[in-house]
Image (spheres, coloured by chain):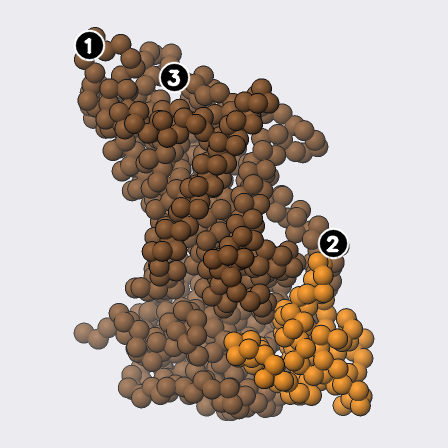
Amino acid sequence: MDVDAETMTLDRLPLGTGGAIVGVCWDKLDERDARRLRELGVDEGVLVEKLHKGPFGADPIACRIGRMTVALRSIQASAILVGARTVR
Amino acid sequence: MTPTPLIALAGNPNAGKSALFNALTGARQKVGNYPGVTVERKSGRMALDDGRPLELLDLPGTYSLTPSSPDEAVTHDVLLGKQPGERLPSALLVVIDATNLDNHLRFALQLIELGLPTVVALNMVDMAERDGLKIDADRLAAELGVPVIPTVAVRRKGIDELKAALGSLAATQAAHPVSEPSGDHDALIVLQRRARAIAAAATTEENFRLRWTHRADAVALHPVIGPILLATILFVMFQAVFAWSAAPADAIDSGFVALQGLVTDRMADGFVRSLIVEGLIAGVGAVIVFLPQILILFLFILLLEASGYMVRAAFIMDQLMARVGLSGRAFIPLLSSFACAIPGIMATRTIDDPKDRLTTILIAPLMTCSARLPVYAVIIGAFIPERTVGPGVGLQGLVLFCLYIAGIAGAMLAAFILRRTVTKGPPPGFLMEMPRYQMPIVRDVLLGLWQRAIIFLRRAGTIIAATTAVLWLLVSYPKPPADYAQPAIDYSVAGRIAGALEPVFAPVGFNRDMALALIPAMAAREVAVSALATVYAVDAEDEAAQEQSLVERLQGRWSLPTALAFLAWFVFAPQCVSTIAVVRRETNSWKWTGFMLAYLFGLAYIAAGATYWSALALGL
């Protein structure tokens, strides 16, 4: 997999781009959110792609995580570190 | 005699569990509640090919066995044999979505570790193939150590094989020790990685892409088209409730009129005939007429849920909800509350944040539930002229739309204030899976509608019939002496109670009959209509008056400001004993229940008064 040297948090990733999760700052999240994100498949090595954002403001965002689409807020996305590479 | 083997059906949300449950059990289902919690208990019977019966228990869809929400707690307790009143299942049927193996396998692994005899249904294999995934079921079975049956529940594919596998499991009858699963975070990660390894080993991937869902989301979640689409869907839904229901409602109405005629002809005049014709048939009929409208509303809700659009609606609404301190997650229970606040309030249990959840429960009764429709429909039918105000937009429909908007606006205002005062807390998060779009299955939607119709008719046959009969007695007795100058109803028990209540309601423009109708309507809102029907049926003195419909009678007796005030009252008033009971159960607090009653009745009184006096001032 050709991962750029550059990494970025998921909230700052431009729409339509993605990459593999290289790290998750579990400590930044409250316990409930952390557990839910784990249950929804967030883990190192999983591919993510930022797909959509809500119509009224920056939140929420819809991301592909592994094989499912998940809606989340930027605050949660900011704990997910992505090895940025462009996915058309 | 050994009891019927109990098979528990478990899996992630969106694994197609309900479709599989329906395919296995058909319409032989029982929906109830676990004692003490509002988690629905859904069970059904199925027969194996050799005729042996099995009982299938559909557990709530959850992501793990960590008992942190009521749904998860029930799943956890049932599978460990700790749920009071439920026997330990003799086997487990785990449903996993073939297109989302990584995630669903994690929960499946956790379930298999419990040690119950287990079969895995690898569901939606057709979708997986469409998305470019090929899954080796035998390899999966070898890795998991349990039988894996590929299925397509919606097309009933693999159902026979699944039955055969369940049959051989049910025969084993071994009492396996059930072990408590480890729910800590590291254990979760270990399971997750094992699941991913197994999924990778069993899957051949070619160009995976959720083509359909991605294309649909490009429209449904578009920043401009998305909100317009949502508004259009909601507007069509509410117009349809009125437009599509006219013909069947008329048919039901004439049916009841014919029934009244039939009973009047066959029976001798007297107490029993009056009770049946004026009390029961008039009262119950006035409510059953609204069955078509209620079913149309439920049809839309069921379709929105089954298609996967509901979560998209929540996504679009999230930031608007956030402005009043709620999350998009609250949108789903609130939209369900348009059909009925009870399933709506029960659906709030998917909201993690306790303050978010409490606020949603407190405002859910402000969503215009289907029981208000009979009230709105009668008043609108009587006082709002039937004309169009634009292409395809009727004035009556528009007024109805405004009543819905009034409820929503009231709810948002209430949430805004509550979140800044009594339910103050950090802003809730928004984290949810957006399931793949799916064509709703006609059979499953019809089954859902059928269950709703039965619940409604049972209510009409019990609560509504009983309150109507009691009201009829109170309205009819005691009979006034021959020289009584006022209407007979003033002399009756009900007339005297209403007379005492009238001064309370007079300032907001309500007359005696309305005060009278509000009392039995505490049981259920739609009783207001049957109550008015009963009051005016008893009150009608001559033959000509007897033949008037409720709408005609109202037109003669109520002024427009009074009618509008009555509508405004019903936008806010929490007149439903079942809702109050559910709020008590879900909040587990009389304090919050009392608070909700006080603030809603207060709002209703103010709204009715404001409507009445502004309508008078405008000269309506």
Q: Earlier along the polypeptide chain: callout 2 or callout 3?
A: 2
Residue B36, quarter of the rendered image: bottom left
- Badge number at residue B225: 2
Q: Earlier in the sequence, mark 3 or mark 1?
A: 1
Q: Give percent across and percent down for residue B25.
A: 40, 64
Numbered tag placed on residue B482 in the rendering: 1
Residue placed most toward the observer, B471 or A66: B471
Using the image, determine if residue B328 lies above or below residue B166: above
Depth check, mark 1 against mark 2: the one in front is 1
Q: Residue at x 43, y 18 (%)?
A: B557
Which secondary structure, mark 1?
loop
- What percent of the width, then of the height, locates residue B251? 45, 31
| Residue A33 drawn above or below residue B474 | below
Kindly identify which numbered label has been placed on residue B398.
Answer: none
Q: Mark 2 to mark 3: distance in Å?
A: 51 Å
The residue indicated by pointer 3 is B547
Q: Mark 1 falls within which chain?
A: B
Query: Is B619 on the left-hand or right-hand side of B509?
Result: right
Chain with brown colouring: B
Whether residue B600 is visible, yes or no, is yes
In the displayed structure, B476 sits above or below B355; it is above
- Observer-nearest of B268 and B474: B474
Task: Return the x and y of residue A82 as percentages of the image width and height.
Answer: 72, 83
> For the residues tagged 1 and 2, is the chain the same?
yes
Which amino acid type corresponds to the residue marked 3 in the rendered image? Glu
Rendering coords of residue B283 (x, y %): 34, 31
Residue depicted at 37% across the width and 14% down the height: B545
Pair 3/1: label in front = 1
The quarter of the picture where residue A62 lies is bottom right
Q: Colour of chain A?
A: orange
Parent chain of label 2? B
The amino acid at mark 2 is Ile
